[in-house]
Image (tube, coloured by chain):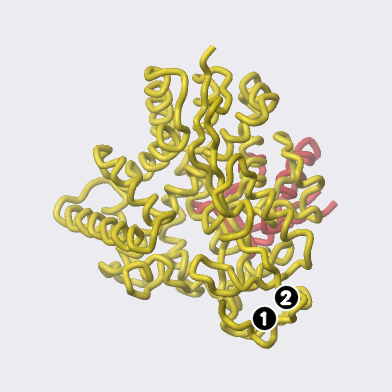
């Protein structure tokens, strides 16, 4: 462990880590969001953890919604510049636009926002629904149980992404494997997977330079930014982000939602009988089972809620913790599927608000609608145990559902 | 009732539009269209609820 910086008051140091604390490591039948929120909301609004990232770097942890809003809305004081992906291949460059700061950030977002705007997503709904139906009907034809993540959530999310990028389906499971290796595996596997994804995206860009099509990669190659075309490097740094962003997070959300519905049969019954409630319920699931933790770097000494943060400090804003802040959400630990005023931060606050949030919402709602419409009353398959975990993207695995009569 | 639109705070969550698309309009990028909104009496409840749903607090209600 590194030595504590001198400006960190000892009374603000927490031993809690999103990576290594109980229930953050893979846990049978766990509830990692509730565990993280319980541990951190019991303490001061802002604490310091010596174990904030998987690389063991220390950081401030901002736990309350109001303070997270303050940090995440100020992209000048709190920089997003990082090299999360490129570090895995021994390089150092930011993902676009996730790890880009103002003023360039807004130019990149203006280019990309229309592609994933709420109205654009309405136009994508047909293909999202068709894919959900196809996967679920396949599951039904095979029997009366399924592994939610591998049979439904991952193939569903990956397929939508491939369609968006304009890639045929036949390499789907290969992509799922790369995504899994990049996010949840050993450093060696991460590096190997990162190279494979980069190689794939480079080949795709090359193909679309020769043979343009009506797809995302062709759009990227033709787009103007700062009055010029993108460099090959920028094409990479942006396509990689869409690859990472659209896979794991949407799949994890669907996993947690079906995990909840398997554990709470009354909620399952309610949504099954009243599918019009799914739209609002999906927001509550996003609040209660948020999976991401934005990280920022302080660019100039600043005080937040009485705590002095110094230039160079890392600040982490776990969304699943702010989403259970009682000052923002009355009775936060109650999962109320009809909750209103649900200003959750599952997609973060501020200029880096998740670019894909509108598509993600559609995928989650459509996925739940079709799953509940087509699969009868389901439960966790007797004799199996789902494993949940915290970390950089929270998740659940080995979620085997069973609906045998 | 009037909705004050703090356009500079809007980050395109589009929750207002999801709850009341006839009251809140979005531009091509998905941001709320600038300009305060005069709300018809029969729309006040929905306009208020949509304003309260903004994660960035970009919408405030003026009676």
Q: Which residue appears farthest toward the right when viewing the image?
A: B63
Colour in which chain B is drawn:
red
| Residue A180: image location, x then y, percent | 39, 50
The shade of chain A is yellow
Q: How many marks?
A: 2
Q: Looking at the picture, tell me which residue is in the foreground, A352 or A381.
A: A381
Q: Quadrant of the N terminus of chain A?
A: bottom right
Give coordinates of residue A115: x percent, y percent: 41, 50
Q: Looking at the picture, how far across and down is residue B49, in whole percent? A: 75, 43
Above-or-below relation of A177 to A265: below
The residue wearing badge 2 is A304
Q: Residue furthest front?
A: A383
- Image mark 1: chain: A
- Label 1 sits on a secondary structure element that is strand
Q: Residue at x 64, y 82 (%)?
A: A4
Residue most toward the top? A405
Mark 1 or mark 2: name the one nearer the start of the chain.
Answer: 2
Classed neighbour count for the residue bearing mark 2: other residues with Cα under 10 Å, few (<14), some (14–19), many (≥20): some
Q: Which quarter of the rendering shows the C terminus of chain A?
A: top right
Q: Residue at x 61, y 38 (%)?
A: A282
Rendering coords of residue A389 (x, y %): 56, 49
Which corner quadrant of the image does residue A3 belong to?
Answer: bottom right
Q: Out of A352 and A87, give the one closest to the viewer.
A: A87
Camera sees residue A21: yes
| Residue at x 39% of width, y 28% of height | A135
Residue linked to disc 1: A309
How far is the residue under mark 1 from the one under mark 2?
A: 7 Å
Q: Nearer the viewer, residue A194 or B22?
A: A194
In the rendered structure, the answer to whether residue A86 lies left or right of residue B52 reads left
- Does the rendering let one see residue A123? no
Badge 1 crowding class, 10 Å Cα cut-off, few under 14, some 14 to 19, many 20 or more, is: many
Question: Is residue B49 found left or right of A110 in the rendered image?
Answer: right
């Amino acid at each position: 462990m590194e030595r504590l910086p001198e400006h960190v008051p000892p009374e603000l140091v927490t031993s809690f880590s999103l990576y290594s604390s109980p229930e953050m490591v893979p846990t049978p039948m766990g509830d990692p969001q509730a565990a993280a929120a319980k541990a951190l909301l019991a303490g001061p609004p802002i604490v310091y953890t010596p174990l904030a990232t998987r690389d063991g770097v220390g950081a401030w942890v901002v736990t309350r919604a109001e303070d997270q809003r303050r940090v995440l809305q100020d992209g000048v004081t709190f920089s997003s510049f990082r090299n999360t992906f490129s570090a895995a291949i021994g390089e150092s460059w930011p993902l676009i636009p996730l790890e880009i700061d103002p003023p360039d950030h807004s130019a990149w977002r203006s280019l990309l926002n229309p592609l994933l705007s709420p109205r654009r997503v309405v136009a994508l709904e047909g293909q999202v629904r068709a894919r959900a139906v196809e996967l679920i009907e396949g599951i039904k034809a095979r029997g009366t149980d399924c592994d939610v993540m591998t049979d439904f959530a991952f193939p569903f999310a990956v397929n939508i992404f491939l369609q968006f990028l304009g890639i045929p389906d036949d390499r789907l499971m290969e992509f799922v494997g790369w995504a899994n290796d990049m996010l949840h595996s050993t450093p060696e596997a991460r590096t190997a997977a990162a190279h494979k994804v980069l190689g794939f995206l480079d080949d795709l860009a090359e193909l679309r330079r020769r043979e343009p099509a009506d797809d995302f990669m062709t759009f990227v190659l033709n787009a103007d930014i700062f009055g010029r075309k993108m460099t090959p490097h920028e094409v990479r740094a942006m396509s990689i982000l869409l690859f990472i962003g659209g896979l794991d997070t949407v799949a994890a959300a669907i996993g947690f939602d079906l995990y909840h519905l398997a554990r709470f049969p009354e909620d399952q019954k309610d949504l099954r009988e009243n599918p019009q409630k799914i739209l609002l319920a999906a927001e509550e699931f996003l609040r209660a089972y948020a999976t991401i933790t934005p990280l920022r770097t302080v660019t100039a000494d600043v005080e937040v809620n009485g705590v002095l943060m110094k230039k160079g400090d890392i600040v982490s804003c776990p969304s699943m913790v702010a989403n259970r802040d009682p000052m923002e959400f009355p009775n936060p630990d109650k999962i109320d599927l009809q909750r209103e005023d649900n200003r959750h931060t599952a997609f973060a606050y501020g200029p880096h608000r998740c670019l894909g949030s509108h598509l993600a919402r559609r995928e989650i709602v459509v996925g739940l609608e079709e799953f509940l419409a087509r699969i009868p009353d389901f439960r966790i398959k007797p004799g199996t145990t789902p494993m949940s975990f915290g970390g950089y993207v929270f998740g659940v695995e080995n979620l085997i559902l069973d609906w045998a009569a | 009732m009037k909705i004050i639109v703090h356009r500079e705070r809007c980050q395109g969550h589009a929750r207002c539009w999801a709850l009341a698309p006839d009251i809140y309009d979005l531009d091509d990028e998905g941001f709320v269209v600038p300009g305060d909104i005069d709300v018809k009496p029969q729309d006040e409840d929905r306009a208020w609820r949509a304003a309260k749903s903004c994660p960035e607090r970009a919408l405030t209600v003026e009676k």
